[in-house]
Every structure is written in C-alpha cells, then in structure tokens.
Image (cartoon, rainbow, N blue to C red):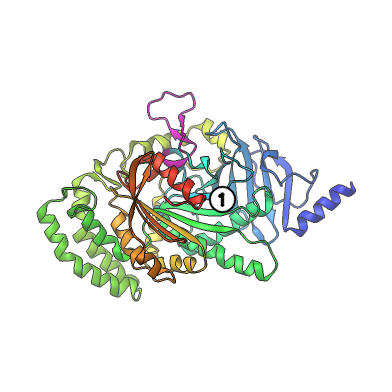
Amino acid sequence: MMLKVIGFLLLTALGVVCNNVQTPLNEPVKVPTFFTSDGNSGKHLSALEADRFTHLQHSRFPNHRIRVKKTTFCDPTVNVYTGYLDVDAGAKHLFFYFFESRNDPDKDDVMMWINGGPGASSSMGLLMELGPCSIDMNSTSSNGTLWNPYSWNEAANIFFLDQPVGVGFSYADFGQTIQTTEDAAKNIQAFITIFFETFTQFKGRPLHLSGESYGGRYLPVFASEIYDQNTIAKQEGRPELNLQSVIIGNGNTGISGLYPGRYEIECGTAALEIPFQSISNCVRMKMALPRCQKQMRENCIDQFDLINCRAAINFCDSELSTGMWASGRNVYDITKMCVGDDLCYHENTAIIEYLNLPEVRELLGVETPYNFSGHSSEVGAGFGAHMDKFNTPTQFHVANLLDRGIRVLIYAGTFDWQCNWVSNKLWVDALEWSGSDEYSAAQWRDWSVEGRKAGEVKSTPLLTFATVRGAGHMVPHDKPEEALTMIQKWLKRQHL
C-alpha cells in the first residue's frame, strides 16, 4: 500500500494523473480523479487494453484529456494505438492514430504527421502515402489494407492526427469548429505535452512535426507554439518538449510565389519538357501576373486587408488558375487526369468507404456519430472566411524557428501544380534569417536512391530544400522509397 501511495505522489508531482479504471468505448468520457494501479500503469503504452480506453489528464491542462487504447489496426508487427484528445472540458474531440517504430521503438524519434486542406483527414496520408498500410484498391487482402514496406514508422514512432476539430474522425459535441491555425496550435501543443509527460518511454525523445500542403501553414505555427511554451516551461522548471525539426512536403508556406510558380508549371519547363497549357492561356496569364503580384503584395503581404486581399486573390485565381481547372488535369499531378472525386484520386473514395465500415470504426474505437469524410468543407469554409492562408506570412515563423536552431526540411514533388516546387523555392530563396547568406552560397546537387537520381537538393545544417523528380503533391504515394530514404537520412542528420 505504501508503494502505491508513493507512486501516486510521484506522478502527481510530475503533473500527470492516470485513471486506469476502464469504461466501455461507447460511454461518455469521465474525468479521472484518482490513481488505482501498481505504479507502472500510464507510463508504458503496452500496458493499455484493446477493448477499453484509458483516460489521461494533466494538471496544467484541466480542460484537456486523452483517451487511448491499443488496437490491431494496420500494422501487426508493432504496437498500435488510437484515441482522442478531448478539449474544452470534453466538448471537442481530436482523433489520433499512433504507430510505434518498426526499427527500435524504445530509442527512435517521435514524429507527428498531419494532412492539409484545411479540412483534410490525416488518415488519407496514413492509408495512401506514408502509413504502415495502404488501402487495398484491388480487394486482394482479407482486411482491406496492404502492407507498406516504405512506411515512415520504419524510422520513427509516428502520430497521425485528425485536426482541427471537424476533420476526419475528430468532432465536437455541439458542432463547433476551429477556424484559425493559431487556435489549432494550442490544442496540438497540449496534446503532445500530455502524451510525452504521461508515457515516460517517449519523454525527452526528439520530436519532428511533419505534413504536407496546408501543413505549410499549420506546421510552422504549431512548432512556434511549442517552442514558445518550452521557453515558459524552462523558466518555471518544467519539462520541455524536445522539438528538433519541421518537415513540410509541397507546402503553401509562402503565398508570394504561389502564382508565379503555377505559371512556370503550366507554361514553362519547370515540370515538363514541353508546356501543356495553351499558348493563348499562357499569354493571358503572363499579362495578368504583374497585376496579381502587385495586388497581393499591397493587400495581403505588406499590410493585410481582408476585403482587398480577398479581391486580389479572386483576381489572381480568375486570370491565372481557370486554365488549369478547365484542363481536367490532376492539380496534384499534372501528368495525370483528375479521376474520382474533386481530390482526383480513386483512393480517396476507397478510404472513405473503408473507414466508414462498422467493423473498422469499432476496431479504432471511433465514437463520433458522424460518417467519416476525407475532407471537411465546413472547416475549409471557416478557415477561408478568416483568410487564414493569407493573413500571416508564415515564412516569418520558419525564419524565427531557424534562428532558434530548429531544423527545417522543405521537399516538393516536381509534378505538383497546387503547391508546386517553384513556389516553394521562391519563398525559401527569399527567406530572411541569420543563415540566409550561407544558404544562398550553397550549391544545388543531385541526390540519389539505389543509384537512381531522386531529385535535387540544397542544404545548410539547419535548412534543406529537396525536389523529388517524378512525384506530385503526395511524394510518399508517388515515390515511396525515395520519400522513406529522405526521412531516414533527415532523422539521422545525414546528407541526401
């Protein structure tokens, strides 16, 4: 009995309370108020049960709770967990998947992956790109998925998080949604803090934030929130999150280069040897581009004005994007035609159908009353109403992170139009930070995988920009071996 009391006092001192009294998955969340285990429960994920949620709470986040359970979903070779972060006194619920590393889960780094949108579920990245299993498009498997030998959990323990609320399996009891990246960042920081301080086998591990597309807006802000909260934690003598890097694939970080980049993809030779867009459309785009850039600079970048910025974006889209949309091509891979839904891949529809199967929802422990949707139009509309994509130059966050020693990897498939590699190169080249001269002086060189050229890379110890030839918006989907090699080298601090 004395040992149990001492164990409870130690956990309380760490700010962690773990209620291991199990409740059925379909019962309402109960706030944990006591500790009733042997002193080890709550410290190691493998102690969790598969048919019940364990409830976790942190003293510094009284309005946040984590519910987590073990599952057999997707990867039978490692421990797999799913659950919810309950925020705002349990009224909002963020769903996550967590896969331990196939390599060395007790020593490997921890990574978080998010998809973009805003409003895209990270299960799309899980089941279509870099997760331990991929959706089975030919119905050859017994469980609807296929083993992915190039999963990023070959190199790291990895979270897939549906965020913000309203995306994927994440939901709110009263239908509210998060509508700005800055608000979403607070929930991300709380979630990661609770997790690391509860499960001590991961405490202190290097943390990497990764994602794609609108992740170019999300991730620098999320990382900045973590860094700033770490500063406060250090001052107060509390544990810090060991944030090491930010990894952005085909992101939309720098809006100033968006339209010039799209012009080069359609009308130049940045993606294809012969431009695919008609000459008449290219002439129209070329003439409109200076006006587009001037209006964006004056109303979105130098000084944000919601009404005038929206007018500028409407003009740019009308003059510079309509030709692409009318072409019928896949905006995420210009070498293909758009198929399936408006996300242009049949896999999206298959994933939605798979995750809505009752047996899959039960396996995951899904409690949302809503059907799964790969992309939330409501969340997208909310972010759009706030002009979240345009109201803050997110490259400023990147510059500040670099100046504080946080490594940043920017990678981009060369066949993407939506968040293309030229746009990304433009903002990275223009980035104002303490290492900008060193980056400017660095030389571009080829990088290879198994003797095959994978793309080009330019790097300094803190900042790396890499292209992936032959890939579109979703690099791990199109070039899985190259993507995994890139991540393995990045985590080991090796040059591509």
Q: Give the x, y percent position of residue 45.
A: 66, 42
Q: Is residue 11 above or below residue 257?
A: above
Q: Is residue 115 left or right of residue 106?
A: left
Q: Residue at x 42, y 23 (%)?
A: 140
Give the residue at mark 1: 93
Q: Left or right of 272: which side holds 49?
A: right
- Element carrying mark 1: strand
Q: Residues within 10 Å of mark 1 (few under 14, many from 20)?
A: many
Residue 87 visible from this viewpoint? no
Please state the horizontal and vertical placement of residue 396, each as a whole percent of the image.
42, 69
Q: Position of residue 101 (x, y in %)?
A: 57, 41
What secondary structure predominates along the stretch shown in magenta?
loop
Quadrant in the rendering for residue 89? bottom right
> Residue at left 70%, top 51%?
31
Stretch of the chain drawn in magenta: 128-150
Foreground pick, 291 / 308: 291
